[in-house]
């Protein structure tokens, strides 16, 4: 009988007001991909943080290769051959990619000599097809590029047991395929892999074993050959889940968002958006597809006024907005869900109620005679928490204590409740579980049915194709092509994302 590479037994972890893990068992064999499934808040990340030494379990034991171990820190985990790719990046923004990899490897100031690091990093990058500039500062990188840097950092250290927490959340289908080739190579080398994903088709394709958590406990153990996607979703959520939906066509109104001949400079001082023109009509969802780092973030930030416009203009609900700022565009009727919820969408130290009121706290009835009306604020936030199914002990809980999906619901509740004419929504379901994604999609379609003009920016191609009436494909900040819903084809859109010219079913915008 093969000795397990990892055996976690009876793991229990309590936080104030919640039991995050309740007697969880997990076994990983050498050369095995063991998937950990569950809703946001089900206990997956807590269990992995215990394995990686970020948390100490209240009860339970851990064995590596049959030997009981105590893991007290990430450095301890790394020494014992455990690597982890975190959903929320563990990178120093002011350092380069290579410097982040070198941190903790020894040498002067805890950093190895950069020459050998860069050489080895280039070899690892080439081997696994995870290309990123080693001299780029982390803060200058798009989210997808930061994810690649995180993956490279783990692969560089030759971990024998690798935890991958939502590693494909910002990757395109071809990039996911390449990553899976890499993971299978690691399997062939006898490495153990713990894979955390909310994308059930990936789980079914890659997994050898599947453990499902719900409310901190194991709700099921199975294999892809023994279960369907619908059954997996039900094990996660505790009820049947609608995995696909039919979006009925509807009559659209006047253009509510017009972006005209836009140029936007990126963090590196060069144009990230070039000559870009888009119109979004009332009752329409226009999806923006593209590989991460092709101008999506800069486009959204320019429309919302977080980034200056070099040339061109933005028209909201019939009015041109000179030098857009968040206050100006909100006053014109635009709401914004940013791609990085913890950097731009919510303040972690603020409570759920405070984050929900960030936009409207100055308006009647929430402010009276210059003073906050606590009862009105509490009534509104309790209502939004219930309406948007935010799982929180109470509305006074610090938002940073919530799971990623519930933080996203807080942001969406705030932005969608403003009755805006225009919604710019970036990566709305990144890193959220299947139940939360289903609900967020439902709310987006309700906004569409109510006449909102929605610009949906997502690197999840399935999401863009499922929800959009039209799709714009961006490549290096320019529109590579536009596709109407009747012509949606994942292969054609994937080719446009990769820079292949339009086919018969696509037209250049």
Image (cartoon, rainbow, N blue to C red):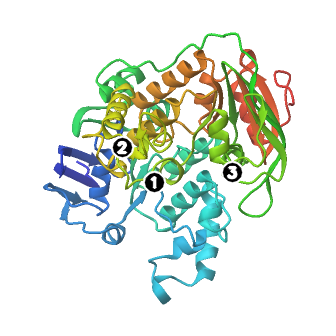
The image's mark for residue 293 is 3
The nearer-to-camera label among 1 and 2 is: 2
Q: Which mark is residue 88?
A: 1
Q: Residue at x 31, y 56 (%)?
A: 49
Q: Position of residue 447 (x, y in %)?
A: 56, 22
Question: Tag 2, which secondary structure?
Answer: helix
The residue at the point 80 percent across, 60 percent down is 270
Instruction: Indicate which disc, 2 or 3, sits on the residue closer to the N terminus.
Output: 3
Image coordinates of residue 389 in percent, x first then y, are 35, 29
Q: Which mark is residue 352?
A: 2
Decide: few, some or many residues near mark 2? Use Cα within 10 Å; few <14, some 14-19, many ≥20.
Answer: many
* Closer-to-camera residue (275/121): 275
The C terminus lies in quadrant: top right
The answer for how far apart the CA atoms under marks 1 and 3 are is: 18 Å
Label 1 close to label 3 by CB (< 8 Å): no
Residue 451 in picture, x, y percent from top left = 63, 18
Q: Can the viewer see residue 197 in this picture?
A: no
């Amino acid at each position: 009988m093969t000795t397990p590479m990892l055996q976690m037994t009876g793991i229990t972890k309590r936080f104030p007001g919640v039991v995050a893990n309740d007697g969880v068992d997990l076994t990983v064999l050498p050369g095995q991909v063991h998937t950990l499934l569950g809703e946001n808040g089900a206990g997956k990340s807590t269990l992995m943080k215990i394995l990686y030494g970020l948390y100490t379990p209240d009860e339970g034991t851990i064995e590596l290769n049959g030997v009981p171990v105590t893991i007290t820190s990430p450095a301890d985990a790394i020494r014992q051959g455990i690597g982890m790719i975190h959903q929320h990046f563990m990178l120093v923004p002011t350092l380069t990619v290579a410097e982040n990899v070198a941190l903790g490897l020894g040498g002067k100031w805890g950093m190895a000599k950069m020459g050998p690091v860069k050489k080895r990093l280039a070899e690892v990058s080439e081997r696994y097809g995870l290309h990123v500039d080693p001299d780029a500062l982390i803060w200058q990188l798009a989210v997808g590029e930061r994810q690649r840097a995180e993956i490279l950092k783990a692969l560089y250290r030759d971990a024998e047991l690798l935890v991958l927490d939502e590693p494909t959340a910002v990757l395109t289908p071809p990039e996911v395929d390449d990553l899976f080739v890499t993971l299978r190579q690691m399997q062939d080398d006898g490495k153990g892999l713990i894979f955390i994903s909310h994308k059930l088709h990936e789980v079914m394709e890659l997994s050898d074993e599947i453990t499902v958590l719900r409310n901190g406990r194991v709700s099921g153990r199975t294999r892809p050959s023994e279960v369907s996607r619908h059954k997996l979703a039900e094990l996660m959520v505790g009820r049947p889940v609608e995995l696909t939906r039919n979006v009925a066509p509807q009559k659209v109104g006047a253009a509510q968002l017009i972006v005209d001949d836009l140029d936007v400079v990126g963090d590196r001082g060069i144009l990230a958006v070039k000559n870009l023109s888009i119109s979004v009509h009332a009752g329409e969802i226009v999806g923006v597809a593209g590989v991460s780092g092709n101008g999506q973030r800069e486009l959204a930030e320019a429309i919302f006024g977080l980034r200056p416009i070099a040339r061109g203009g933005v028209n909201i609900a019939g009015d041109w907005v000179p030098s857009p700022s968040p206050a100006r565009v909100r006053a014109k009727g635009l709401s914004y869900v940013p791609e990085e919820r913890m950097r731009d969408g919510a303040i972690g130290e603020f409570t759920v109620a405070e984050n929900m009121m960030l936009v409207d706290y100055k308006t009647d009835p929430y402010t009276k005679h210059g003073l906050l009306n606590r009862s009105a604020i509490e009534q509104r936030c309790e209502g939004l928490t219930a309406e948007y199914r935010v799982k929180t002990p109470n509305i006074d809980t610090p938002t940073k204590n919530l799971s990623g999906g519930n933080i996203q619901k807080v942001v969406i509740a705030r932005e969608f409740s403003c009755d805006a004419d225009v919604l710019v929504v970036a990566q709305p379901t990144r890193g959220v579980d299947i139940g939360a994604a289903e609900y967020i999609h439902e709310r987006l379609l309700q906004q569409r049915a109510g006449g909102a003009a929605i610009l949906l920016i997502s690197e999840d191609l399935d999401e863009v194709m499922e929800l959009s009436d039209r799709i714009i494909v961006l490549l290096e900040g320019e529109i590579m092509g536009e596709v109407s819903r009747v012509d949606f084809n994942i292969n054609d859109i994937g080719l446009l994302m990769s820079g292949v010219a339009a086919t018969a079913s696509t037209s250049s915008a």
